[in-house]
Amino acid sequence: MLSSPPQHGTGPSTDDPAAAEAVFLDSTLRLLHPLAAGPGGVVADIGPGAGSATLALAAAVGPTGRVYAVDHAPAMLDTVAAAAESAGVADRVVLVEHDLDDGPPPLPERVDGVWSSACVHHTRDWAAAVAGLAGLLRPGGVLCLVEGGLPTRCLPVDVGMGLEVRLDEAHARWFADWAAGRRQTRQRGWAELLTAAGLVGVRTRSALVESPAPLPADVRAVVLAELTARVRRAHPFLSADDAATWARLLDPAAPSWLGLRDDVALLSARTSYWGSSAH
């Protein structure tokens, strides 16, 4: 949604967001469940990335339903449009160019559900963004946010002892620095924000993301791309030794390149928070 890559998840973290979203698709489909999107429904996907959730929602609402795909970046909307055309659902996907920092999306109607994954944490005021999205709902409609979860673990034990934990710490410092530069307001927990926005029955669930070693080639490529992006962002906050270690592990020309190993895995979890409009 905004200019910097997301803290977690897929999308513009990598050069191939569609490939990354494919790896996480099973967890996306499980986390979409609270929306209960069905034939004739009207839903919104805020920050759709390459469109994997948009397509799933479009299939669920059918030809009589609508999915509003909202993003501030025309290039991402073009990607979603191409994916919808390829999947044969372009007739029910409506593209909306909008930045959440400018307020809630100007949709022409209230919706049955709002989905947003790894997007809202980029806004300057989380409470205002959540309240604005909640205001898009029809009575009984559901807002579902996917934000955070558990840190991803990929490295073999002989190289990963503490290295990924320290990367998490450095990445958290990077994000705090980035947020301060955007003058983000003091933030609260997601469940609290949904409740403060007037939603009822606020709940949470997590979905495991697991692909054991040896990874298929497409999953390995995504894992390495995600690690490279994460290390790049966190680099100013890494120690010199850790930065050098990551450089060796992520250099395709180095003998220690992770792409040469068959014991790299993928283990993570994504967490969703959802609640219903009471009015």
Image (cartoon, rainbow, N blue to C red):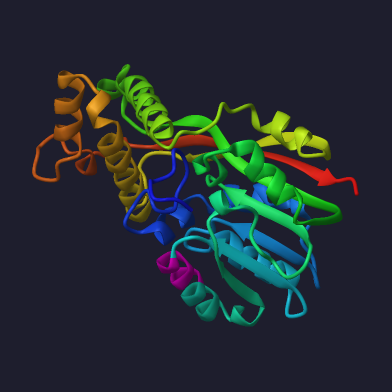
Q: Residue at x 66, y 33 (%)?
A: 190
Q: Is residue 250 above or below residue 170?
A: below
Most foreground residue, 218 or 133: 133
Q: Residue at x 25, y 38 (%)?
A: 232
Left or right of 210? Residue 273 is: right
Quadrant of res 196: top right
Q: Residue at x 67, y 68 (%)?
A: 67
Q: Position of residue 134 (x, y in %)?
A: 75, 48
Q: Position of residue 201 (x, y in %)?
A: 85, 37
Q: Is residue 91 above or below residue 30?
A: below
Instruction: State how many labels appear.
Output: 0
Quadrant of res 237: top left
Left or right of 262? Residue 210 is: right
Q: Is residue 26 magenta?
A: no
Is residue 207 in view?
no
Q: Is residue 197 above or below residue 240?
A: below
Q: Residue at x 66, y 48 (%)?
A: 30
Left or right of 270? Residue 205 is: right
Which contiguous range is marked in magenta?
Answer: 74-80
Most foreground residue, 20 or 201: 201
Is residue 212 in view?
yes
Q: Position of residue 179 (x, y in %)?
A: 43, 33
Q: Position of residue 223 (x, y in %)?
A: 35, 44
Most foreground residue, 201 or 20: 201
Which SS does the magenta portion mostly show?
A: helix
